[in-house]
Image: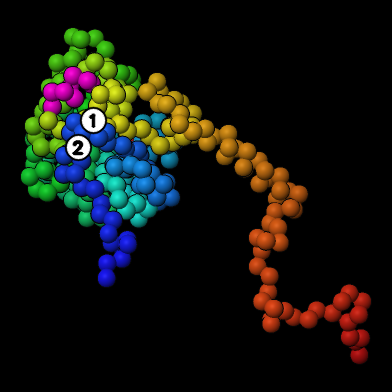
Amino acid sequence: MVSAQNEIRRLTAPDIRARKGGEPIVSLTSYHAHTARIVDAYCDVILVGDSLGMVMHGLETTVPVTLDMMILQGQAVMRGSKRALVVVDMPFGSYEASKKQAFASASRVLKETGCGAIKIEGGRRLAETISFLAERGVPVMGHVGLTPQAINTLGSFRAQGRNEIDWGPIEADARAVAEAGAFAVVLEAVAEPLARRITSQISIPTIGIGASPACDGQILVLEDMLGLSPRVPRFVKRFGELGPSIEQAVRTYAQEVRARTFPGAEHVYPMRQATVAKLPERGKGPSRA
Ligand code: KIV
């Protein structure tokens, strides 16, 4: 007999690739088992983004994030989810040096997490690497436009392609990633008309973040859309305001602990009836010899 759990099939990179021009691809980031479980019920793709460096660890940029950090959180997300395609970001320094380095890092991610795909940042300069990986069984999601791992050469996190004169290289990057064999590409902070145009030109799904409603899918960082991040970029819509409700819960907890009203009788473990020791009532105990 096949159990109900076995009937749930995870989406694969080819499933997502086949969604080009179809029903929008819904994606969010997650780094933990518990949030992955919630997100999994509604999303097609869960990205274990290297944004975890900033969101979980309070780093200024994603540059210091390591492969081990990505693998640890990738494992957590795989345990928490069962339906969505889980994509794990390759962190800065784990794939740029050579195709071989990229394959060694990507194969560690696939083997150690069990995820279905990896994501790498960069366009034309990464095309050969993307082909090398895709030909060797590594599904690759590309990422062009604003590529946060390049912060030290970009100078700031700013939108790309807001002047038409800058469109050429961004279009060429997206096309190169598609032609190299990526199954989808993230367009981050790309001017709306350019993101729309790229989406209509390339053969693989585009997943927008601060890009265009015309993209084949959308992605946001979960903590941003839940209202937990202190800095909110223009492209984030806050679908929730968890910050104030978490603060309220913590305030109430602290008050109740201080007042000794928590834990209540329902939160502690009484002894089982048979084993309750008969304690003498105060003042009525056996008299000492
Ligand atoms: O790291 C991340 O969360 C990302 C998304 C913003 C696309 O790359």
Relative to 258, 246 lies left or right:
left
Q: Can you give x and y, in whole percent of width and height, for residue 4 in the image?
A: 32, 62
Which quadrant of the view contains residue 166?
top left
Q: Is residue 197 magenta?
A: yes
Residue nearest the viewer, comparing 31 with 66? 31
Mark 1 neighbour density, 10 Å: few (under 14) some (14–19) many (20 or more) = many
Read off the residue under disc 1. Answer: 216
Q: Can you give x and y, in whole percent of width and height, for residue 282 in the image?
A: 89, 74
Does residue 195 lie above or below 141 as drawn? above
> Of marks 1 and 2, which one's residue comes earlier in the chain?
2
Relative to 143, 249 lies left or right:
right
Quarter in which the C terminus is drawn: bottom right
The residue positioned 31% from the left and 37% from the top of the image is 26
> Which mark is on residue 6?
none
Segment tinted magenta in the rendering: 195-202
Q: Is residue 236 visible?
A: yes
The reply to whether discs 1 and 2 touch (Cβ–Cβ < 8 Å) is yes
Identified by mark 1, the residue type is: Asp
Read off the residue under disc 2. Answer: 19
The residue positioned 27% from the left and 70% from the top of the image is 1
Relative to 221, 280 lies left or right:
right
Which quadrant of the view contains residue 171?
top left
Q: Residue furthest bottom?
A: 289
What secondary structure prevails in the magenta region? helix
Relative to 5, 240 lies left or right:
right
Give the distance between the C-alpha atoms of the residues marked 1 and 2, in whole angstroms: 8 Å
Residue nearest the viewer, comparing 185 with 18? 18
Identified by mark 2, the residue type is: Arg
Mark 2 neighbour density, 10 Å: few (under 14) some (14–19) many (20 or more) = some
The residue positioned 18% from the left and 50% from the top of the image is 107
Secondary structure under tag 2 reads: loop
Secondary structure under tag 1 reads: loop
